[in-house]
């Protein structure tokens, strides 16, 4: 089953569960039993319960009794529509008022809690639906990993799965103590805010480590704007959490408490969602760097970077070429199949020759013939590396159909290579060259930024869906 069909099937199942739960609740909810924990013993002999609806024609009392543990129970059946208060008496003495509401379908709700006899099925149905979503997303995530299909879609699968799992966890914990639909919605509304602050120490620690790695990066590689991304993120995330705390205090003084609370909870959801996406990006980038490519390659693209003043490869560039050579030799030993090299990189204004020429000379020094090298010397960035190399492969092979490609680059750069290869229609897998640890965190952030830009409309739609679901839930809570 392809991924698109899998998600369509999932959507059908989730909709069926939701519709089934609603239908069940409407049918089961035409009766209602109120159970009170007013007695702490089972000696109820001689006590009688009487329930009297103040308005006739809405509900009728079908039973009034004490259950096996001594709790008083009053059962009703709907016979009309509207609001009704039921007075409950013990031995003729008024004890409490039970506020009820019956809708057009005859479902009896207890006002003030949005409780009805079918709520458990609805609650379980929602949690099962979320659970199915998590299972399908996690399965698809690991399927992409197994097939070496690293992409921004894979990041989204992991991030959304984490987000749904957080919602499920909080609500299962809540179900253990408060078994009402009102509390289910309440916990759902609070989930984003709770998750944002429970995860805050871990996220801030991650940001601090990334910022620390950026300091090392700046010391060893010099200042470039993209080398300071980790420091920017650390400061931004800290100020965001601080801003949420300050904003909550301002809103509480400016508007109604419930309105202010709902705004803050909704912001918490957005922060939580972005934190899940960041974590998923880190995991995907790490897995991409560690995953070995299959020994079936026809071409190996080697991504260029700066060269020395004398035209020889820098240690980073040499590491990429060496990784490509090592892979090609291992492939030939295991399968008897040679791969052609595609050194990719143009000539910078401060470079004596093109990066691709520098790599070609190094490959020839290692004993490879010129006919095994397809040079690409026009590109000036990674996107062009992949795109122009694809064009050179097409020129050389005459077709891209069934052509297997490897992309040799530094380990922190592997995930971006997968993303760009997918973008330009190449069946490519990464070949990783090792480098310093402090390059990694910045690469995670670049991929996270790339995710936000490349999938901006998808993310906006998801966030709008979260906000819409939040508004609907908070409206139901207000009606309760």
Image (spheres, rainbow, N blue to C red):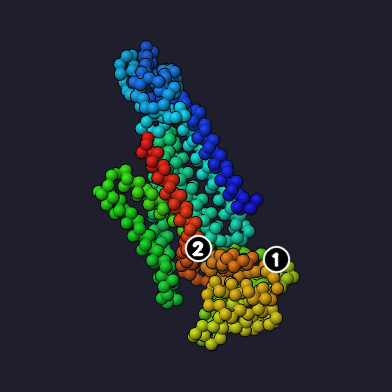
Is tag 2's residue or tag 1's residue first in the polypeptide sequence? 1
Instruction: Identify the residue at horizontal 65%, vertical 83% (top origin).
Output: 364
In the rendering, which numbered label is found on residue 402? 1
Q: Say left or right for 21 vs 338.
A: left
Instruction: Identify the residue at horizontal 56%, vertical 45% (top origin).
Output: 11
Q: Secondary structure at mark 2?
A: helix
Q: Quadrant of the C terminus?
A: top left
Furthest-left residue in this view:
253
Q: Position of residue 267 (x, y in %)?
A: 38, 52
Furthest-right residue in this view:
336
Q: Position of residue 8 (x, y in %)?
A: 59, 48
Instruction: Identify the residue at horizontal 53%, vertical 60% (top origin).
Output: 152
Q: Is residue 350 visible?
A: yes
The answer to which quarter of the image holds residue 317 is: bottom right
Q: Is residue 98 visible?
A: no
The answer to which quarter of the image holds residue 234 is: bottom left
| 343 in relation to 331, above or below | below
Q: Secondary structure at mark 1?
A: loop
Residue under pointer 2: 454
- Badge 1: few (under 14), some or many (20 or more) residues near its Cα, within 10 Å? few
Instruction: Identify the residue at horizontal 30%, vertical 18% (top origin).
Output: 94
């Amino acid at each position: 089953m392809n991924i698109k069909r899998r998600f369509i099937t999932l959507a059908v199942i989730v909709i069926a569960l939701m519709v089934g739960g609603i239908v069940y609740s409407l049918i089961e909810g035409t009766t209602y039993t109120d159970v009170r924990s007013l007695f702490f013993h089972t000696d109820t002999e001689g006590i009688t319960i009487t329930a009297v609806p103040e308005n006739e024609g809405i509900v009728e009392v079908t039973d009034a009794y004490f259950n096996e543990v001594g709790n008083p129970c009053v059962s009703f059946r709907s016979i009309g529509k509207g609001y009704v208060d039921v007075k409950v008496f013990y031995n003729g003495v008024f004890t409490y008022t039970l506020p009820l509401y019956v809708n057009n379908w005859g479902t009896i709700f207890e006002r003030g809690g949005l409780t009805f006899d079918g709520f458990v099925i609805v609650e379980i149905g929602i949690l099962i639906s979320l659970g199915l979503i998590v299972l399908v997303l996690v399965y698809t995530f690991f399927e992409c990993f197994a097939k070496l299909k690293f992409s921004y879609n894979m990041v989204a699968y992991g991030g959304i799965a984490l987000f749904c799992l957080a919602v499920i966890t909080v609500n299962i914990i809540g179900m253990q103590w408060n078994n009402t639909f009102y509390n289910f919605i309440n916990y759902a509304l609070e989930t984003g805010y709770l998750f944002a602050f429970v995860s805050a120490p871990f996220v801030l620690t991650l940001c601090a480590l990334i910022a620390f790695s950026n300091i090392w990066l700046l010391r060893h590689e010099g200042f470039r704007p993209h080398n300071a991304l980790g420091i920017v993120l650390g400061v931004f995330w800290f100020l965001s959490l601080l801003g949420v705390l300050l904003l909550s205090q301002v809103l509480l003084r400016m508007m109604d408490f419930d309105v202010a609370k709902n705004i803050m909870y909704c912001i918490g959801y957005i922060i939580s969602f972005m934190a899940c996406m960041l974590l998923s990006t880190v995991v995907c980038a790490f897995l991409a760097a560690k995953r070995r490519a299959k020994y079936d390659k026809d071409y190996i693209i080697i991504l260029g970077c700066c060269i020395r003043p004398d035209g020889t490869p820098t240690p980073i560039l040499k590491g990429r070429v060496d990784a490509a050579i090592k892979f090609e030799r291992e492939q030939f030993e295991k399968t008897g199949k040679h791969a052609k090299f595609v050194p990719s990189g143009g000539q910078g204004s401060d470079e004596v020759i093109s990066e691709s020429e520098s790599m070609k000379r190094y490959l020839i020094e290692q004993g490879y013939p010129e006919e095994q090298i397809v040079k690409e010397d026009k590109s000036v960035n990674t996107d062009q590396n992949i795109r122009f190399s694809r064009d050179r492969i097409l020129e050389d092979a005459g077709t891209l159909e069934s052509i297997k490609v490897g992309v040799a680059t530094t380990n922190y750069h592997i995930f971006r290579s997968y993303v760009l290869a997918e973008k330009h229609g190449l069946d490519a897998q990464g070949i990783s060259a090792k480098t310093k640890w402090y390059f990694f965190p910045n690469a995670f952030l670049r991929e996270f930024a790339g995710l936000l830009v490349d999938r901006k409309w998808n993310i906006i739609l998801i966030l709008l869906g979260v906000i819409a679901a939040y508004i609907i839930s908070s409206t139901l809570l207000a009606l309760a």
